[in-house]
Amino acid sequence: MKKPPPPSGRAVTFSTFFFTAPALTGLTIFVLLPFVLAIILSLTNVRLGSPVPSEFVGLRQYQRILSDPTFRQAIINNSLFAAVVVPLQTICALLLALMLNTPLRGMAVFRTLFFMPVIFPLSLVAVIWVLILAPGPDGMLNSFLEYVTFGHWQPKNFLRDPYLALPSIMLTSIWQGVGFQMIIILAGLQAIPQNLYEAAAVDGANRLQQLFRITLPMLRNTLLFVILVTTILSFRLFDQVQVMTRGGPNDGSTTVMYEAVQTAFVRLQIAKGSAMTVILFLIVLLLTLMQRYLVRRSTLANKSGSGEHNS
Protein backbone atom coordinates (compact mmCIF):
# COMPACT_ATOMS: atom_id res chain seq x y z
CA MET A 1 0.00 0.00 0.00
CA LYS A 2 1.35 3.38 -1.01
CA LYS A 3 2.00 5.77 1.89
CA PRO A 4 0.33 9.23 1.71
CA PRO A 5 2.72 12.13 1.09
CA PRO A 6 3.88 14.03 4.19
CA PRO A 7 2.07 17.36 4.86
CA SER A 8 3.71 20.49 3.56
CA GLY A 9 5.27 23.08 5.87
CA ARG A 10 2.38 25.49 5.34
CA ALA A 11 -0.17 22.78 6.26
CA VAL A 12 1.77 21.94 9.43
CA THR A 13 1.91 25.63 10.40
CA PHE A 14 -1.83 26.06 9.87
CA SER A 15 -2.63 22.92 11.88
CA THR A 16 -0.37 24.06 14.72
CA PHE A 17 -2.04 27.47 14.84
CA PHE A 18 -5.54 25.94 14.59
CA PHE A 19 -5.11 23.56 17.51
CA THR A 20 -3.23 26.02 19.77
CA ALA A 21 -5.52 28.98 19.06
CA PRO A 22 -8.06 28.19 21.87
CA ALA A 23 -5.31 27.90 24.48
CA LEU A 24 -3.53 31.03 23.23
CA THR A 25 -6.82 32.94 23.27
CA GLY A 26 -7.52 31.89 26.86
CA LEU A 27 -4.01 32.80 27.99
CA THR A 28 -4.27 36.19 26.30
CA ILE A 29 -7.67 37.05 27.80
CA PHE A 30 -7.24 35.65 31.31
CA VAL A 31 -3.48 36.00 31.92
CA LEU A 32 -1.64 38.35 29.56
CA LEU A 33 -4.27 41.11 29.31
CA PRO A 34 -4.94 41.36 33.10
CA PHE A 35 -1.20 41.42 33.76
CA VAL A 36 -0.66 44.26 31.25
CA LEU A 37 -3.54 46.17 32.87
CA ALA A 38 -1.98 45.58 36.31
CA ILE A 39 1.32 47.05 35.09
CA ILE A 40 -0.48 50.11 33.70
CA LEU A 41 -2.51 50.61 36.91
CA SER A 42 0.61 50.19 39.06
CA LEU A 43 2.07 53.34 37.48
CA THR A 44 -0.90 55.46 38.55
CA ASN A 45 -2.54 56.52 41.84
CA VAL A 46 -6.02 55.09 41.10
CA ARG A 47 -8.08 54.60 44.26
CA LEU A 48 -11.74 53.63 44.15
CA GLY A 49 -14.09 56.17 45.76
CA SER A 50 -11.40 58.81 46.07
CA PRO A 51 -12.24 62.38 44.92
CA VAL A 52 -8.59 62.89 43.92
CA PRO A 53 -8.23 62.67 40.12
CA SER A 54 -6.10 59.82 38.83
CA GLU A 55 -2.66 60.67 37.52
CA PHE A 56 0.50 58.98 36.31
CA VAL A 57 3.01 58.61 39.16
CA GLY A 58 5.51 56.27 37.50
CA LEU A 59 7.87 54.31 39.72
CA ARG A 60 7.06 56.38 42.82
CA GLN A 61 4.35 53.80 43.59
CA TYR A 62 6.99 51.07 43.79
CA GLN A 63 9.27 53.26 45.94
CA ARG A 64 6.45 53.77 48.46
CA ILE A 65 5.67 50.04 48.56
CA LEU A 66 9.27 48.93 49.00
CA SER A 67 9.74 51.45 51.85
CA ASP A 68 6.62 50.15 53.62
CA PRO A 69 7.71 48.03 56.65
CA THR A 70 4.56 45.89 56.44
CA PHE A 71 5.28 44.94 52.84
CA ARG A 72 8.92 44.19 53.64
CA GLN A 73 7.75 41.96 56.50
CA ALA A 74 5.41 40.21 54.04
CA ILE A 75 8.34 39.44 51.71
CA ILE A 76 10.37 38.11 54.68
CA ASN A 77 7.45 35.92 55.79
CA ASN A 78 6.97 34.59 52.25
CA SER A 79 10.70 33.80 51.94
CA LEU A 80 10.76 32.09 55.34
CA PHE A 81 7.64 30.12 54.46
CA ALA A 82 9.20 28.91 51.18
CA ALA A 83 12.56 28.12 52.85
CA VAL A 84 10.85 25.84 55.39
CA VAL A 85 7.88 24.40 53.52
CA VAL A 86 9.52 23.53 50.18
CA PRO A 87 12.25 21.18 51.54
CA LEU A 88 10.09 19.72 54.32
CA GLN A 89 7.11 19.07 52.08
CA THR A 90 9.31 17.55 49.36
CA ILE A 91 11.05 15.22 51.83
CA CYS A 92 7.72 14.15 53.37
CA ALA A 93 6.24 13.54 49.89
CA LEU A 94 9.29 11.48 48.88
CA LEU A 95 9.09 9.33 52.02
CA LEU A 96 5.35 8.78 51.56
CA ALA A 97 5.81 7.90 47.88
CA LEU A 98 8.57 5.39 48.73
CA MET A 99 6.34 3.84 51.37
CA LEU A 100 3.29 3.66 49.09
CA ASN A 101 5.28 2.24 46.17
CA THR A 102 5.56 -1.14 47.87
CA PRO A 103 3.26 -3.87 46.48
CA LEU A 104 1.16 -4.52 49.59
CA ARG A 105 -2.54 -5.34 49.87
CA GLY A 106 -4.79 -2.31 50.47
CA MET A 107 -2.15 0.17 49.32
CA ALA A 108 -4.72 1.97 47.12
CA VAL A 109 -6.67 2.85 50.26
CA PHE A 110 -3.63 4.46 51.88
CA ARG A 111 -2.85 6.38 48.67
CA THR A 112 -6.40 7.73 48.67
CA LEU A 113 -6.22 8.73 52.34
CA PHE A 114 -2.93 10.59 51.91
CA PHE A 115 -4.17 12.35 48.75
CA MET A 116 -7.58 13.26 50.20
CA PRO A 117 -6.53 16.60 51.84
CA VAL A 118 -5.52 17.90 48.40
CA ILE A 119 -9.10 17.81 47.10
CA PHE A 120 -10.44 19.80 50.06
CA PRO A 121 -10.69 23.60 49.62
CA LEU A 122 -7.89 25.41 51.41
CA SER A 123 -10.39 27.54 53.33
CA LEU A 124 -12.03 24.37 54.70
CA VAL A 125 -8.63 22.93 55.65
CA ALA A 126 -7.77 26.19 57.41
CA VAL A 127 -11.03 26.11 59.41
CA ILE A 128 -10.29 22.53 60.50
CA TRP A 129 -6.81 23.54 61.68
CA VAL A 130 -8.21 26.56 63.53
CA LEU A 131 -10.24 24.07 65.56
CA ILE A 132 -7.19 21.82 66.07
CA LEU A 133 -5.04 24.78 67.17
CA ALA A 134 -7.69 26.23 69.48
CA PRO A 135 -6.19 28.02 72.50
CA GLY A 136 -6.50 26.87 76.08
CA PRO A 137 -6.23 23.43 77.68
CA ASP A 138 -9.32 22.20 75.82
CA GLY A 139 -7.75 22.75 72.38
CA MET A 140 -7.10 19.51 70.49
CA LEU A 141 -3.36 20.05 69.95
CA ASN A 142 -2.83 21.52 73.41
CA SER A 143 -4.64 18.54 74.97
CA PHE A 144 -2.56 16.08 72.93
CA LEU A 145 0.76 17.76 73.82
CA GLU A 146 -0.26 17.90 77.48
CA TYR A 147 -1.05 14.18 77.39
CA VAL A 148 2.22 13.08 75.71
CA THR A 149 4.33 15.31 78.00
CA PHE A 150 2.59 14.01 81.17
CA GLY A 151 1.18 17.45 82.02
CA HIS A 152 4.37 19.48 81.48
CA TRP A 153 3.02 21.29 78.38
CA GLN A 154 1.71 24.80 78.95
CA PRO A 155 -1.28 25.55 76.66
CA LYS A 156 -0.45 27.97 73.82
CA ASN A 157 -2.51 30.29 71.70
CA PHE A 158 -0.81 29.15 68.50
CA LEU A 159 -2.50 31.59 66.11
CA ARG A 160 -2.01 34.66 68.33
CA ASP A 161 1.60 33.98 69.32
CA PRO A 162 4.02 36.01 67.12
CA TYR A 163 6.50 33.10 67.12
CA LEU A 164 3.97 30.31 66.48
CA ALA A 165 1.47 31.86 64.04
CA LEU A 166 3.58 31.41 60.89
CA PRO A 167 4.82 27.89 61.88
CA SER A 168 1.17 26.93 62.42
CA ILE A 169 0.35 28.04 58.87
CA MET A 170 3.40 26.11 57.61
CA LEU A 171 2.13 22.95 59.33
CA THR A 172 -1.31 23.39 57.80
CA SER A 173 0.13 23.93 54.32
CA ILE A 174 2.41 20.89 54.51
CA TRP A 175 -0.46 18.68 55.70
CA GLN A 176 -2.73 19.88 52.91
CA GLY A 177 -0.25 19.89 50.03
CA VAL A 178 2.00 16.90 50.63
CA GLY A 179 -0.42 14.53 48.87
CA PHE A 180 -0.08 16.43 45.58
CA GLN A 181 3.70 16.14 45.55
CA MET A 182 3.44 12.53 46.71
CA ILE A 183 1.35 11.55 43.67
CA ILE A 184 3.82 13.17 41.25
CA ILE A 185 6.82 11.48 42.88
CA LEU A 186 4.94 8.16 43.02
CA ALA A 187 4.38 8.37 39.26
CA GLY A 188 8.10 9.03 38.81
CA LEU A 189 8.96 6.02 40.98
CA GLN A 190 6.74 3.72 38.94
CA ALA A 191 8.44 4.89 35.73
CA ILE A 192 11.87 3.63 36.87
CA PRO A 193 12.69 0.33 35.07
CA GLN A 194 12.66 -2.60 37.50
CA ASN A 195 15.59 -4.25 35.74
CA LEU A 196 17.87 -1.58 37.25
CA TYR A 197 16.95 -2.75 40.74
CA GLU A 198 17.28 -6.41 39.71
CA ALA A 199 20.78 -5.77 38.32
CA ALA A 200 21.73 -3.84 41.47
CA ALA A 201 20.47 -6.69 43.66
CA VAL A 202 22.54 -9.18 41.67
CA ASP A 203 25.60 -6.96 42.26
CA GLY A 204 24.91 -7.04 45.99
CA ALA A 205 23.55 -3.50 46.48
CA ASN A 206 21.37 -3.09 49.56
CA ARG A 207 18.19 -0.97 49.81
CA LEU A 208 20.03 2.19 50.89
CA GLN A 209 22.54 1.92 48.05
CA GLN A 210 19.72 1.37 45.56
CA LEU A 211 17.99 4.49 46.92
CA PHE A 212 21.01 6.77 46.46
CA ARG A 213 22.45 5.16 43.29
CA ILE A 214 19.23 4.44 41.34
CA THR A 215 16.07 5.94 42.80
CA LEU A 216 17.17 9.51 43.55
CA PRO A 217 19.17 9.99 40.30
CA MET A 218 16.25 8.65 38.25
CA LEU A 219 13.84 10.95 40.15
CA ARG A 220 15.99 14.01 39.60
CA ASN A 221 13.74 15.74 37.03
CA THR A 222 10.59 14.81 38.95
CA LEU A 223 11.97 16.26 42.18
CA LEU A 224 13.08 19.44 40.42
CA PHE A 225 9.57 19.87 39.01
CA VAL A 226 8.05 19.31 42.46
CA ILE A 227 10.41 21.84 44.05
CA LEU A 228 9.69 24.43 41.36
CA VAL A 229 5.91 24.08 41.64
CA THR A 230 5.99 24.09 45.45
CA THR A 231 8.15 27.23 45.47
CA ILE A 232 5.73 29.07 43.20
CA LEU A 233 2.72 27.95 45.26
CA SER A 234 4.43 29.02 48.48
CA PHE A 235 4.55 32.61 47.24
CA ARG A 236 0.81 32.50 46.49
CA LEU A 237 0.01 31.89 50.16
CA PHE A 238 -3.31 33.57 50.96
CA ASP A 239 -6.24 31.36 52.06
CA GLN A 240 -4.64 30.03 55.24
CA VAL A 241 -3.56 33.54 56.29
CA GLN A 242 -7.02 34.99 55.59
CA VAL A 243 -8.85 32.33 57.62
CA MET A 244 -6.37 31.56 60.41
CA THR A 245 -4.52 34.76 61.38
CA ARG A 246 -5.49 37.64 59.04
CA GLY A 247 -1.82 38.51 58.85
CA GLY A 248 -1.30 38.89 62.59
CA PRO A 249 -0.17 39.18 65.20
CA ASN A 250 1.83 42.34 64.44
CA ASP A 251 2.21 41.33 60.76
CA GLY A 252 3.96 38.16 61.90
CA SER A 253 2.13 36.00 59.35
CA THR A 254 1.20 38.43 56.60
CA THR A 255 2.24 37.64 53.03
CA VAL A 256 2.62 39.54 49.77
CA MET A 257 -0.56 38.09 48.31
CA TYR A 258 -2.54 38.84 51.49
CA GLU A 259 -1.28 42.44 51.50
CA ALA A 260 -2.13 42.84 47.81
CA VAL A 261 -5.71 41.62 48.31
CA GLN A 262 -6.21 43.72 51.44
CA THR A 263 -4.84 46.81 49.71
CA ALA A 264 -6.87 46.40 46.52
CA PHE A 265 -10.24 45.11 47.79
CA VAL A 266 -10.44 46.30 51.41
CA ARG A 267 -8.63 49.63 51.32
CA LEU A 268 -9.63 50.11 47.63
CA GLN A 269 -6.10 51.18 46.61
CA ILE A 270 -6.23 49.49 43.23
CA ALA A 271 -2.98 50.98 41.90
CA LYS A 272 -0.99 50.03 45.00
CA GLY A 273 -2.43 46.50 45.00
CA SER A 274 -1.56 46.13 41.31
CA ALA A 275 2.03 47.20 42.00
CA MET A 276 2.28 44.57 44.74
CA THR A 277 1.14 41.83 42.36
CA VAL A 278 3.72 42.98 39.79
CA ILE A 279 6.46 42.74 42.44
CA LEU A 280 5.21 39.27 43.41
CA PHE A 281 5.34 38.21 39.75
CA LEU A 282 8.92 39.47 39.42
CA ILE A 283 9.98 37.56 42.55
CA VAL A 284 8.45 34.31 41.27
CA LEU A 285 9.94 34.89 37.80
CA LEU A 286 13.40 35.47 39.30
CA LEU A 287 13.19 32.28 41.37
CA THR A 288 12.04 30.30 38.34
CA LEU A 289 14.90 31.58 36.18
CA MET A 290 17.41 30.83 38.93
CA GLN A 291 16.13 27.27 39.27
CA ARG A 292 16.20 26.74 35.49
CA TYR A 293 19.77 28.03 35.38
CA LEU A 294 20.86 25.69 38.17
CA VAL A 295 19.08 22.74 36.55
CA ARG A 296 20.66 23.42 33.17
CA ARG A 297 24.09 23.81 34.73
CA SER A 298 23.66 20.55 36.66
CA THR A 299 22.49 18.74 33.52
CA LEU A 300 25.49 19.93 31.51
CA ALA A 301 27.83 18.90 34.33
CA ASN A 302 26.29 15.42 34.45
CA LYS A 303 26.54 15.03 30.66
CA SER A 304 30.18 16.10 30.64
CA GLY A 305 30.89 13.74 33.54
CA SER A 306 29.18 10.84 31.72
CA GLY A 307 31.13 11.64 28.55
CA GLU A 308 34.46 11.58 30.38
CA HIS A 309 33.49 8.34 32.12
CA ASN A 310 32.50 6.66 28.82
CA SER A 311 35.66 7.82 27.07
Image (tube, rainbow, N blue to C red):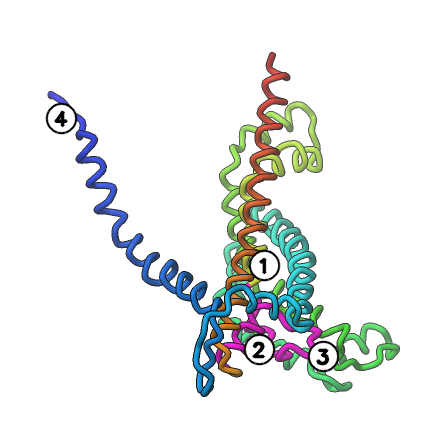
Q: Quadrant of residue 234?
A: bottom right
Residue topped by disc 1: 178
The answer to whether 195 appears left or right of 74 in the picture is left
Label placed on residue 4: 4
Which dot, 3 or 1, sits closer to the camera? 3
Magenta-colored span: 236-265
Q: Quadrant of the N terminus?
A: top left
Label 2 sits on a secondary structure element that is helix
Q: Relative to 282, say whether 146 is above or below.
A: below
Q: Position of residue 293 (x, y in %)?
A: 57, 39
CA gap, disc 1 and disc 4:
50 Å
| Residue 263 painted magenta | yes
Q: Amino acid at mark 2?
A: Gln
Between 13 and 219, the one lying in front of the other is 13
Earlier in the chain: of badge 1 and badge 4, it is 4
Q: CA distance from mark 3 to mark 2?
A: 15 Å
Labels 4, 3: front one: 3
Q: Quadrant of residue 200?
A: top right
Across and down, in percent, residue 102 comes to 58, 46
| Lower position in the chain sequence, tag 3 or tag 2 | 2
Q: Nearer the viewer, mark 2 or mark 4?
A: 2
At 49% from the left and 72% from the top, the residue drawn is 121
- Of mark 3 and mark 1, the one earlier in the sequence is 1
The residue to which callout 3 is attached is 250
Q: What amino acid type is highlighted by mark number 4?
A: Pro
